[in-house]
Amino acid sequence: MQRKILFVDDDQSILDSFRTMLHFKRKEWRCYFADSGPAGLAILDRHPIDVVIADMRMPGMDGGDFLKEVEKRQPGAVRMILSGYSEMQLLLKSVKHAHQFLSKPCSSDTVVETIRRVTELSHILNHDGVRRVVAGVDSLPAIPDLYVRISEELSRPEPDLKRLAGLVERDVGVTATLMRVVNSSFFGFYDKVSSPARAVVLLGVEALKGLVLGEHLLREIKGDSLAGYSVNKLWEHSLETGYFAKAIASIERKDDQFVEDCFISGMLHDVGKLVLATEMQERYAAVLERVRTNSGPVYGAEGLEFGVSHAEVGAYLLGLWSFKARVVEAVHGHHLPVVCVADCSATMIVHAANVLQHELRQYSGYTHSVMDEPMLESLGLADRIGAWREACKKYMEKA
């Protein structure tokens, strides 16, 4: 299927350069070009668009206002902003309406690779209705107590970044939301950031103040917004799965970056549950009722209700937000790691950490995932389960 890409920039020379650089992709992508926000909206009214890339600084309607309107008219479209580093305040204004941010000047390779990556996400989440809902998520909610403490710290005359980092890495929603921003090419970091604490340091106090206090990117979760789901259990399970994945990767003697990727993948593996429970509350309440009645696994009940599970939803969201491919794959496959290669991959490690966390904490009330021992056997890893279990137990004792 030919993807439809819309470029909006008031500089005709930039539009011409995009047209030239993407000529070789004409069989795969149908590209449209507009020299203003209103002209771009006119194209949107005539054609369904997969990806929109808009310049931040345009006369009349700037990129942030334009993408806000795109979100209303075609909520399933992937939205990107092109911006210069000197435009920090304008960038912060647009952060709620753009999935990703590209820095100017932007190489043709970066543009092509970014479009390719987001258009290929459709194989993860092929349900149009759910995809539109996920594409409309601009941030994930935080635990009320942590939200208040983060806001209070940022309101101090001299906020402590170390204290902020400690608060952020205790919350799934805050971690995912801030890493979405810091991993954009706008900030110019060559490697994707996998550490919540490092994300806080790289953003810095002023950017954090703008995001949290100025644009209110973070929001606290409401007690009645999880459709009967236990917030505390969800956060406890997510955080501990992250630390279990880190422990398993460490004893397998993986490098520091791989270990950090496993931690963030484990921490965010159930982020799709948070999306479904807060954005589609009534339907997710039906999922939980089915689980309580039939004692089946949650992801199975989600499949019956939505046609997809939280694994696909979470992976699609993180892919939209420019997380590492390794993290997206691990979140996608944490229940059914059938795409693992012959290696101890992050996907398999997060799968094992998720199963072991349920096993060791012994949650009651519904059926949990079981270890994919045939897959581990095929990878020559079945004899490592005992060592992984012991590593997780040691973490629990230390914690």
Image: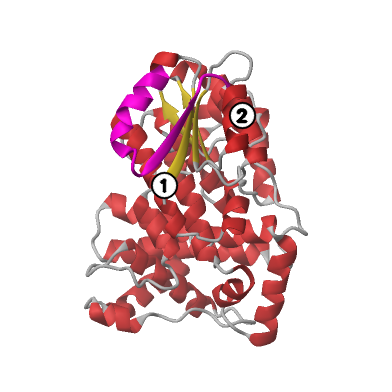
What residue do we see at 67% from left, 39% from top? Answer: 72
- Name the spot of residue 238 as percent of width and height, x first: 52, 62
- Name the spot of residue 259 as percent of width and height, x first: 32, 56
Magenta region, residue range: 14-36
Instruction: Tell me whether the residue at label 1 lies in contact with that at label 2, contact meaning CB atoms closer than 8 angstroms.
Output: no
Name the residue furthest bottom. 294
What residue do we see at 39% from left, 41% from top? Answer: 29
Residue 95: which numbered mark, if any?
none
Image vertical order of residue 80 relative to residue 256, above or below: above
Image vertical order of residue 144 relative to residue 329, above or below: above
- Name the spot of residue 57 as percent of width and height, x first: 53, 17
Q: Residues within 10 Å of mark 2 (few under 14, many from 20)?
A: few
Q: With 260 as the anchor, is 276 left or right in this view?
A: right
Q: How is the image coloured?
A: secondary structure
Q: With 262 as the anchor, is 37 left or right in this view?
A: right
What residue do we see at 69% from left, 42% from top? Answer: 148
Q: CA distance from mark 1 to mark 2?
A: 20 Å
Which amino acid type is marked by label 2? Ala
- Name the spot of residue 341 as percent of width and height, x first: 25, 67
Please tell me which residue lies in front, 89 or 253. 89
Q: Quick check: is 241 in the magenta stretch?
A: no
Tally of numbered tags: 2
Which amino acid type is marked by label 1? Gln
Could you say whether the residue bearing mark 2 is in a helix, strand or loop?
Answer: helix
What residue do we see at 61% from left, 47% from top? Answer: 137
* Residue where numbered disc 1 is placed: 2
Q: Looking at the image, can residue 210 be seen? A: no
Q: Quick check: is 25 in the magenta stretch?
A: yes
Report which quarter residue 40 is drawn in: top right
* Residue where numbered disc 2 is placed: 42
Could you say whether the residue bearing mark 1 is in a helix, strand or loop?
Answer: loop
Please tell me which residue lies in front, 211 or 328. 328
